[in-house]
Image (cartoon, helix red, strand yellow):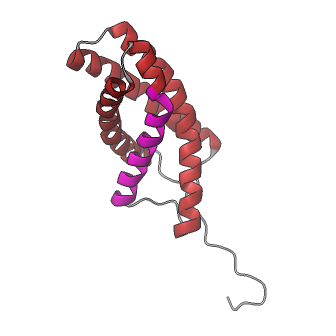
Amino acid sequence: MRTTSDRIRHAILFEVFGLILMVGGATLLTGLDLHALGVIGVVSSVVATIWNYVYNWLFDRAMLRLRGSVAKTHPIRAVHAVLFEAGLLVLLLPFVAWVLGVTLWQAFLLDIGIAAFYVVYGYGFNWAYDRVFPLPATSPPAPSRGSAA
C-alpha cells in the first residue's frame, strides 16, 4: 500500500499535469472561452484531487480484498481509469453545464471528450508514476505460531 504522503503527491502531480494539458487542449480543439474552461478546469481539478485520493484508497482496498494485492495488470489499470472518470463525470456534470450555460446534454458531450482524454491520460500517468515511484517493497508475512518454518 502507498503512504498518505505518496498518495497526496500522486494526486497533486496528476492534477497539475492534467489541468495544463486539458485546458490548453480543450481551448484549441473546441474554441470555447479560455476563462470558462479555466474555471471548469480549476474547480474540476480540486474536485478530482479529492476524488482521486478517495477513489484510489477505495480501489486499493477492494484490490486487497479481492486479489490480496494492489498490483495492477494492464486490464485492471484500464478498468481503474474508466471507473475513476465515470465517477468524476457524475460529480461534475451539473457544474460544467452551469458555467458554460449549456444543457446537461451539451455538457455531457463536452465531459465525454474531457473524460476520454483523462482515461488515456490517467492510464499513462499512473503507469509512469508507478515506474518513477514504485510501490514500497513488502516483506513476506511472518509465520504464525505453531507452524513449521
Q: Is residue 131 visible?
A: no
Give yes or no for residue 90 being in the magenta stretch: yes
Q: Which quadrant: the N terminus?
A: bottom right
* Residue 95: x %, y % from top left: 48, 21
Tell which of 115 and 97 is nearer to you. Answer: 97
Q: Is residue 12 above or below residue 58?
A: above
Tell which of 7 and 111 is nearer to you. Answer: 111
Q: Is residue 64 above or below residue 129?
A: below
Q: Is residue 16 above or below residue 82?
A: above
Could you tell me which residue is drawn at 59 percent across and 66 percent down? Answer: 65
Q: Is residue 5 left or right of residue 104?
A: right
User: In terms of image quadrants, where is residue 20?
Assistant: top left
Q: Which quadrant: the C terminus?
A: bottom right
Residue extent of the magenta highlight:
74-93
| Residue closest to the far right | 145
Q: Is residue 7 visible?
A: yes
Q: Is residue 119 above or below residue 94?
A: below
Q: Is residue 46 left or right of residue 97?
A: right
Could you tell me which residue is drawn at 47 percent across and 45 percent down? Answer: 133
Could you tell me which residue is drawn at 35 percent across and 35 percent down? Answer: 115
Magenta stretch prevailing secondary structure: helix
Tell which of 27 and 125 is nearer to you. Answer: 27
* Residue 71: x %, y % from top left: 47, 60
* Residue 119: x %, y % from top left: 34, 41
* Residue 116: x %, y % from top left: 30, 37
User: In terms of image quadrants, where is residue 103?
Assistant: top left
All told, the count of numbered labels is 0
Give yes or no for residue 114 being in the magenta stretch: no
Could you tell me which residue is drawn at 36 percent across and 24 percent down? Answer: 107
